[in-house]
Image (cartoon, helix red, strand yellow):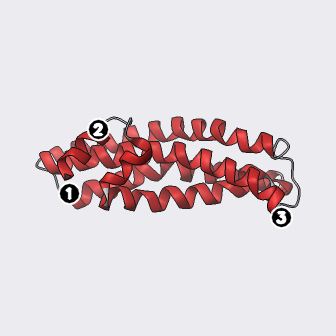
Amino acid sequence: MKTIFVIVLFALVGTLGGWLFNFLANLAGGVGALIGFLGRPKKLVGLRNAFPVLTCALAQAYVFLVWGAFVVSYTTLVTRHQPVVGWLVWIVAFYAAMVPGCAAAGESIREEKENPELKSSVPHVALGISGFLAFAAFFVFAFLPNTMLYGWGWVPFVRAVTSDVD
């Protein structure tokens, strides 16, 4: 019964929190878009154009990773201290952690269909990079929880998880 409760909780909180963090990632990525001349469509080739894309991608990725660190640390605590089916909870936690990146990518694809010139805009290109970083970080955080301390120690539950590992 606790497993079902945790799964429903992750599904609801993951979806709602994911939309919030998607909005925050768009705000954070706006810095790179401003550096890249307000994300105007142009050819993104060369070192001069790499800086806005990387700035936007790292800002978006940091926000996605805040959410990922929270989900991983909470899931770790739940699976360690509650009688739940761990592998099932981890599958739903992966869904909850990936919602912001997936929602942003879906919105980006929808906007690209309406305006094909967006394919070469700074935020659109950066979204692929930040989505990959969020995907990879989920597994790094899950298998090496101490890595969360290097940029996300302030996130709730992270210190509790990493103190259990030591």
Question: Which residue corresponds to the image point at 83% horizontal and 57% vertical from the top-left?
Answer: 48
Q: How many marks?
A: 3
Q: Can you identify the residue that label 1 sits on?
A: 86
Q: Nearer the viewer, mark 3 or mark 1?
A: 3
The amino acid beneath tag 3 is Gly
Question: Would you say the residues marked 1 and 2 are in contact, meaning their CB atoms lie under 8 Å apart?
Answer: no
**Quadrant placement of the N terminus:** top left
Query: Could you tell me how far apart the alpha carbons at marks 3 and 1 are, in whole angstroms?
Result: 46 Å
Q: Nearer the viewer, mark 1 or mark 2?
A: 2
- x and y, in percent, of residue 14 in the image: 41, 42
The amino acid beneath tag 1 is Gly
Query: Could you tell me how far apart the alpha carbons at marks 2 and 3 are, in whole angstroms?
Result: 41 Å
Q: Can you identify the residue that label 3 sits on?
A: 46
Residue 7 vs residue 128: left or right?
Answer: left
The amino acid beneath tag 2 is Phe
Question: Which residue corresponds to the image point at 38% horizontal and 61% vertical from the top-left?
Answer: 139
> Residue 54 is drawn in which quadrant?
bottom right
Q: Secondary structure at mark 2?
A: loop
- x and y, in percent, of residue 65 in the image: 47, 48
Question: Which residue corresponds to the image point at 62% horizontal and 59% vertical from the top-left?
Answer: 129
